[in-house]
Amino acid sequence: MKRSTERFLTTHTGSLPRPPDLIRTMFAKEEGVPVDPAALERRVAEAVAEVVRRQASAGIDIVNDGEMSKPSYATYIKDRLNGFGGSSQPLTYQDLVDFPTLAQRVFGDPGRARRKTPGCNAPISVRDPLAAELDIQHLKAAVAAAPHQEAFLSAASPGVVALFFQNTYYKSREDYLFSIA
């Protein structure tokens, strides 16, 4: 990690807004519509380059890829790991129970309903070993053309995956978390 004695280095973490055409393509893929994988990969690379340029332009020192290759910050796991099928029970956020209008705004987003969140119903193994490599390649290409101090990629933690993807396969939460990790 770089340090500065002259100023605070800035960063952020997580998803940044994806371009509308990229969102449409990702949702189409989620819904089983045939999508040209090469065209999608090119569009992701372009989106990463643009989001890195925008971060650098805004003064962000430690940039990331904005999670452009992922339909959401957690549900992409099902595309990269085996063992997730069927459906998961929707989460109930206890702090929203007393605020139904806010809950509707949070969960009424049509995009949220289109994201598929299956449960863990089989042994977890790597499905797509090249996906993270492609993310790295796209970020490296983008940061080569933009001023920055450092760059990083976000990943869903085992705890986040376990929260979003209900386990019906592993005997214990510990076994499930260990397998995700």
Image: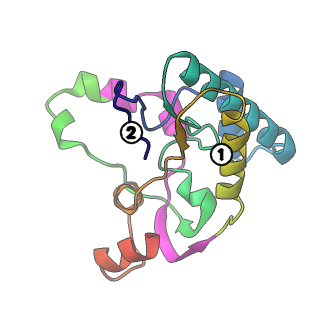
Which numbered disc flags the more N-terminal residue, 2 or 1? Answer: 2
Judging depth in this view, the residue of 64 and 59 nearest the camera is 59
Total numbered circles = 2
Q: Is residue 13 above or below residue 76?
A: above
Look at the image and give the residue range highlighted in magenta. 104-126
Report the side of 90 relative to 76 (left or right).
left
- In the picture as drawn, the residue positioned furthest to the bottom comes out as 171
Residue 77: percent from left, percent from top: 54, 57
- Is residue 44 among the parts visible in the rendering? yes
Query: Can you tell which quarter of the image residue 88 is in?
Result: bottom left
Q: Tell me the residue at 30%/77% (across/down).
A: 174
Q: Tell me the residue at 72%/52% (across/down).
A: 134
Residue bearing mark 2: 3
Residue bearing mark 1: 30
Judging depth in this view, the residue of 108 and 25 nearest the camera is 25
Query: Can you tell which quarter of the image residue 17 is in?
Result: top right
Within-10-Å neighbours for mark 2: few <14, some 14–19, many 20+: few
The residue type indicated by label 2 comes to Arg
- Is residue 31 among the parts visible in the rendering? no
Report the side of 44 relative to 168 (left or right).
right
Query: Can you tell which quarter of the image residue 99 is in?
Result: top left
